[in-house]
Image (cartoon, rainbow, N blue to C red):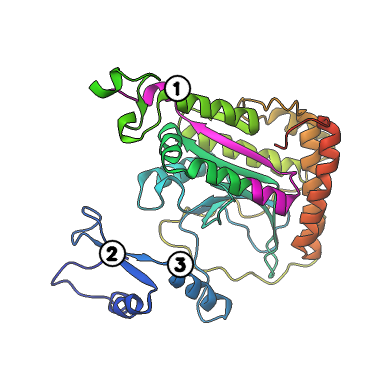
Amino acid sequence: QLAAPAGALRCASLQQLPALLTLGYAKERKRKGACPSGVVYELLPAGRARAEALVREGEAPPAAPLRSSRRVQPGEAGVVLLLVDEREGGGSSCGKMAELCDALDREGARFETRRLPSGHGDYEWVLADGSPAAHEVVLPLIVERKGCLDVSASMRDGRWRRQQAAMEARNASEFGGAATIEYLLEGDVSKTKHTCAACAALPGGGGVGGCPTDGWPTVAAVEEELRRAEATYKVTRTASIAHTAAHLAVEQRRLQLLRPQQPQQTRRPEPRAHASSPTRASPVRGAAEPPPTPPTARAEQLAEVQPPPAHASPSGGDSDSEASLLDQAIAAACESSRAGSPSAARAATAATSASGAAAGGGGSKPR
């Protein structure tokens, strides 16, 4: 929350900040240009934990997403919903987050922003319904977006390998190694090259993000790290935020077509309580789920919906077998969603890893 400038009226929330600071729930930060006073307040982990406890205990309503489009409505079932980490692109205080959400909205993607835990990547998909219990089952896809400067900065401070380790650990624990880990690499390394007098004498073609004498990796080091990522994970290269949004929207539609069709509900469940959306949230469009698609037409639609070209992993993974495994995982998720048991979905998803190894060969790497 931004602090009010001197002499301005103080709202009730701002008046509570001294107590939050004393309890260690918030911390004052100095950020010139963020607001007229240059003072902002950061919610600390202890404060976030307390806020989540209040929501669980029913003393506070759950927070609405910062941005959303076509959220799951009461009576819907089997909806593939894209979750976007609310810190993606620098969060709500950075223009990239707004640019991404605007592009997703234009592409017609069903999404909402949430704070995703470590190891979940920047994006994930859930199979959701509009029942009062609001069942959600996470699908076996972990997607991380990185611009060239992001790769360089994360290599510099060690986050690059830590994030990979966190995603691999989550894949092993939650999906039995059967999930697809995908990198969306945005932009061109050659266009982010830093050159200065100090760089000219250094091997490696200059730095990315800054001078190598200040600890920034060279162009050669970044390119080598990207080649290593392509040899280990699924990698899709995009040219811009708009291209990234288009890829995510196509992937969401592909997953929606893959999921087994749900039977029509004979009784409409009670409406699910939603917190009122903020004024920045995108309007809800097309809330009603479309009628089931006949199997023949569904197969034709699936053949037409193809994601942008991706750099395939050298593990020799066959796209048909991968789609079959994903179809099995989504089928298990549907059964679990109806039964209200997410753990059963994780077990069923993990079971597909054995068939995945048989399809890709004994020496294949997990995607």
Q: Is residue 238 left or right of residue 310?
A: left
Question: Which residue has dot 2 on it?
Answer: 2
- Name the residue located 82 percent from the left edge and 36 percent from the top edge: 357
Q: Are marks 3 and 2 in contact (CB under 8 Å)?
A: no
Q: Amino acid at mark 2?
A: Leu
Residue 306: quadrant of the picture? top right
State how far apart marks 3 and 1 are (Cα).
38 Å
Q: Is residue 180 visible?
A: yes
Crowding at dot 3, Cα within 10 Å, few <14 / some 14-19 / many 20+, comes out as few
Q: Residue lying farthest left?
A: 7
Is residue 175 within the magenta segment? yes
Question: Which residue has dot 3 on it?
Answer: 45
Q: Which residues are magenta?
A: 168-195
Q: Is residue 5 left or right of residue 107?
A: left
State how far apart marks 3 and 2 are (Cα).
18 Å
Please state the horizontal and vertical placement of residue 310, each as a whole percent of the image: 62, 27
Asked which secondary structure carries label 3, the reply is helix
Question: Which residue has dot 1 on it?
Answer: 220
Crowding at dot 1, Cα within 10 Å, few <14 / some 14-19 / many 20+, comes out as some
Q: Amino acid at mark 3?
A: Pro
Q: Are marks 3 and 1 in contact (CB under 8 Å)?
A: no
